[in-house]
Amino acid sequence: MNQFLREHIVAEEKPLHEIEKDFSSAAIPEQPEFVSAHTEHLLDTLVSHSVHTSSPSFIGHMTSALPYFLMPLSKIMIALNQNLVKIETSKAFTPLERQVLGMLHKLIYTEQDSFYQKWMHSAEHSLGAFCSGGTIANITALWVARNRALKAQGDFLGVEKEGLFKAMKHYGYEGLAILVSERGHYSLKKAADLLGIGQQGLVAVRTDENNRICPLDLERKFKELKQQKNPPIRGYWCCWYHGNR
């Protein structure tokens, strides 16, 4: 793979506006093309001007070279094309996913083996969820936390059924808040916006010289929010304090 990349990725810099000329047409091609011809086209226009993330001289943000064993494994995954949205399209991959989630859960929460024997493969429960990235992970975690904070009660069917306005009215809240480290990831703003909490519902908590949450400031902000009838949504602290220990 490294040899292939060395041969096909152009070393010299090419301005982006020059590269864009190869991708300027918005028309979908109507005529088919041989795979070999299209492969050459991709090598010349796409691969040659991509980023060699496995290069020893590459210093990039978030992305690095993949482990070598993923390349042969990826061929199997592509050929199988499993869809874990349901057992009918994944079969053994579903219990494998649940097992890995159980391993990660045990690594963090260290429950007894009996706990995982009971819950790991329960069709009615889940110990977690795999996400495509940090943004989706934060949105998913806060989504669950919001729904737990505004769960069904009496005649109220829950925020997922009746919506945020009726949920706030039922519980007598004037707003919701997310307590987050002042160094929290910017994806939390997206999550607050998407979930109807609003970016102003993000309440920053001071950090110390080691970038850790200051407990006293956290307690003070928590009390202030309760007095304002803006309760912090409880449940997923690892999401609230993203990037800090």
Image: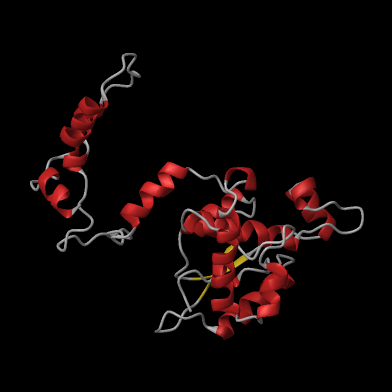
Give the image location of residue 124, x and y in percent: 75, 58
Q: Quadrant of residue 228?
A: bottom right
User: Which residue is rendered at x = 21% and y = 44% of the image?
Assistant: 50
The answer to whether 85 is drawn above or below residue 44 in the figure is: below
User: Which residue is rendered at x = 62% and y = 68% of the image?
Assistant: 236
- What is the residue that sits farthest to the right in this orientation? 155
Please name whichever residue, 153 or 32, is drawn nearer the observer in this view of the structure. Answer: 32
Residue 11 horizontal side relative to residue 60, left or right: left
Give the image location of residue 29, x and y in percent: 32, 17
User: Which residue is rendered at x = 55% and y = 54% of the image?
Assistant: 93
- Residue 203 in sight from this viewpoint: no
Q: Quadrant of residue 128?
A: bottom right
Please name whichever residue, 18 or 189, is drawn nearer the observer in this view of the structure. Answer: 18
Residue 52 horizontal side relative to residue 216, left or right: left
The answer to whether 213 is drawn above or below residue 145 in the figure is: below
Residue 96 horizontal side relative to residue 157, left or right: left
Applied colour scheme: secondary structure
Q: Quadrant of residue 216?
A: bottom right
- What is the residue that sits farthest to the left in this orientation? 12
User: Which residue is rendered at x = 74% and y = 63% of the image?
Assistant: 149
The answer to whether 178 is drawn above or below residue 34 in the figure is: below
Give the image location of residue 54, x and y in percent: 22, 58
- Residue 51 in sight from this viewpoint: yes
Please name whichever residue, 19 or 219, is drawn nearer the observer in this view of the structure. Answer: 19
Give the image location of residue 136, x and y in percent: 52, 54
The answer to whether 105 is drawn above or below residue 170 in the figure is: below
